Image: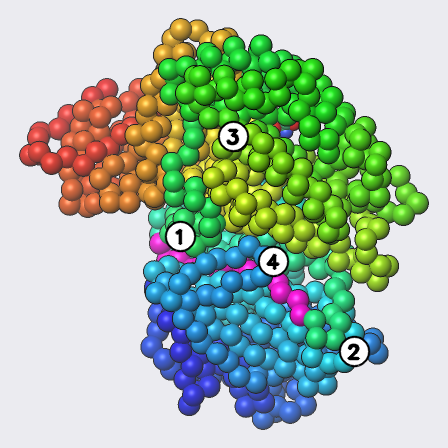
Amino acid sequence: MICFNEQMQSFFLHSRSSTYVMKVIENGQLLHLYWGDRIPECDLSYIHLFYNRSFSPVLYDASELCYSLDTLSAEYPAFGYGDYHTPAFTIQAPNGSRICDLRYTGHMITPGKPDIQGLPHLRADENEADTLALFLRDDLLDLEVTLFYTVFKDLDVISRYAVIKNRSSQELSLLQAASCCLEFDHSDFQLIDLHGSHCRERQAERTPLHHGIHSIESRRGASSHQLSPFAAFARPDTGEQHGEVYGISLIYSGNFRISAEVDQFDRLRVQAGINPFNFRWTLGSGDSFTTPEAIMVRSTAGLNGMSQNFHALYRQHLSPSRYTKAPRPIVINSWEASYFDFDEEKLKALIASCEGLGIDTFVLDDGWFGHRDNDTSSLGDWAVNTKKLPHGLSGIIETCKRHHMEFGLWFEPEMVSPDSDLYRRHPDWCIHAPGRIPSQSRNQLVLDLSRQEVQDFMAEAVSSILREYDIRYVKWDMNRNITDLGSEGLPADRQAELSHRYILGLYAVLERLTTAFPHVLFEGCSGGGGRFDFGMLYYMPQTWTSDNSDAVDRLKIQYGTSYLFPPAAMAAHVSACPNHQTGRMTPFETRGNVALGFCFGYELNPLHLSPEETEAIKRQTARYKEFEPLMLEGRFYRLCSPFQGNECCWQQVSSDGSLSIVLYARVLATCNPPVPRIQLAGLLPNALYRIDELDLILPGEVLMNVGFSIPWLWGDFSTMLFTLRKYEGLPEKQTQKE
Ligand code: DGJ
């Protein structure tokens, strides 16, 4: 997968169908030459033609007269010698100089993939991946930069990160360090990003690239609802099923930046990594800094091809959790059923009403601890409120057992309420700027996870509850972003390390908890999908996709999220109507159809349902169980985008192609509409499939090329879920049922 051609001084990284080429030139600089369709090994330096260009400074030791970093593609560019684009990293020497000149000193190719200490990362053994470590060095600074590249055998993925080590005896300051830098010698791409807000996460947006810098970033201390750590660069004619696209993401949950810079020669530089805004890291003598890992995907099979590479990484190479590939519980969550307004009797009645519905886990959401009757108090005081629950959690857990259900619990461990014993004991434990009154958001402050004692407290607070009770599921929430950056645990010259140290502290706690309690399924949540990223998914294989449970809005949210994450990472629940976020009335069937195929559950009180709805729950949970393998191991295809019109369609196919489900949704009804026809994807071309709902049997290649027509739908917010099963009988003459 990775080879170094001595004669050409070139590295060739071959993934399933792509090749990535770098070359060490005479003066030791490392250039990027190519990332595209698979090619044989060949010296690609002929592509550089050296013109004398005004205002493009020539490097002091270049063999070519017109050799300028202003016009060449550096692999990990530094600032100072004529490259005027955004540098990949910037380091400051004690004398104030920010110039750096990295030259190649050697490399190492090893099978498999090393772990990255302290950061979530992809994992692969020697049969699955090879890793290249490329050593670069600045002699004057006595600085070593190692670039790591892992190539995954069966995927079109290269993952990258950098380790920056100060070998000098002096202190250096790292001002910026990207995880990856990518150069393209053209910018004939459109940019796809996932923007949004609370309750409107991951809306897909496709825009042309312009000269200058376009930046996708978060400064909120979390990967954010507003922009996900993701960018795709698609050729203008690339669609869901065809065309070339490059997708970038990060295994990181904090402030990030992905930038796309189009220069004077229409070339594109893409970089991804920790956001340099408000970042500075002191590297003492001998210290090193490791960037988060970046994921780079290339696909010529369109946006679905790109997504399936990301999805396969999630399934095979990310989370060590035993739940990643294991069946997930069908939960009923208490939040929208009762909010803060519950006591033991109410919860027991709720649990009892689930008997026989096929729901297997009851999750007690916010409000069970301290004196938390609303969102103004008690975060940090993780002791059961015995006024509400006189038998502690045991009374509830016993009731769950009696009704054949497991028990799950909500925590928001990273936060503290000003009205809490914890805050009264340790006011200095929250993030705050000295002498300033910290800003509150949802009446709460953020604990300073850069401090070891705070990490210890937090890990112990959660552990003691998990030790005491039989808890199988934890919903880990985080309901505000960080402001008032300041830590009493850090000296003045290290305050700009706080945002990253917070994330490192969080990862350290999650590592402790997930190692100590491997039987617990952790679900990530940040007011829904405010921290839905590969970093959190390493510890918690699923995320509450959005606080918005409205089935119509969920079409866009789940469709957009699928660019990056598979259905097995997305929790989707059926909730009550009128919907609590939008006030919309949607059919119960639509709510089920939109959530089926994802980590399924309910966000309502069965006691308030009609007998028909209760019966519908039984059908939905049975269908979910049948289709669960498609979610865990199958492939997901986006077929028709809700961002482009009134319809939405997606499809899931089992790993062996024998079973598939197709969701079709029409948002608003129109009178006398055209008949929609859907062409499917991912089926076995020569196999026959029976579509249960249409009583239709057709070959896979016909369903993928001709498609099938959607029967008449009545009313707004209508959906149909189609089931396709591989059919072993003889083909029959077909007529489509209406
Ligand atoms: C925000 C979450 O996203 C909700 O599901 C719920 O858990 C509330 N927090 C509880 O405060």
> Label 2 crowding class (10 Å Cα cut-off): few <14, some 14-19, many 20+?
some
- Amino acid under disc 3: Asp
- Mark in the foreground, 1 or 3: 3
Q: Which of the two discs, 4 and 3, labels the residue nearer the N terminus?
A: 4
Residue at the spot of label 4: 118
Residue at the spot of label 1: 316
Q: Nearer the viewer, residue 427 or 307?
A: 427
- Amino acid under disc 1: Gln
* Residue numbers of the magenta segment: 288-302
- Mark in the foreground, 4 or 2: 4
Q: Is mark 1 within 8 Å of ligand 1?
A: no
- Amino acid under disc 4: Gly
Q: Is mark 2 within 8 Å of ligand 1?
A: no
On the image, the x and y values in percent for residue 392 come to 62, 21
* Mark 1 and mark 2: Cα distance apart in space: 42 Å
Checking the image for residue 170, the label placed there is: 2
Q: Which of the two discs, 4 and 2, labels the residue nearer the N terminus?
A: 4
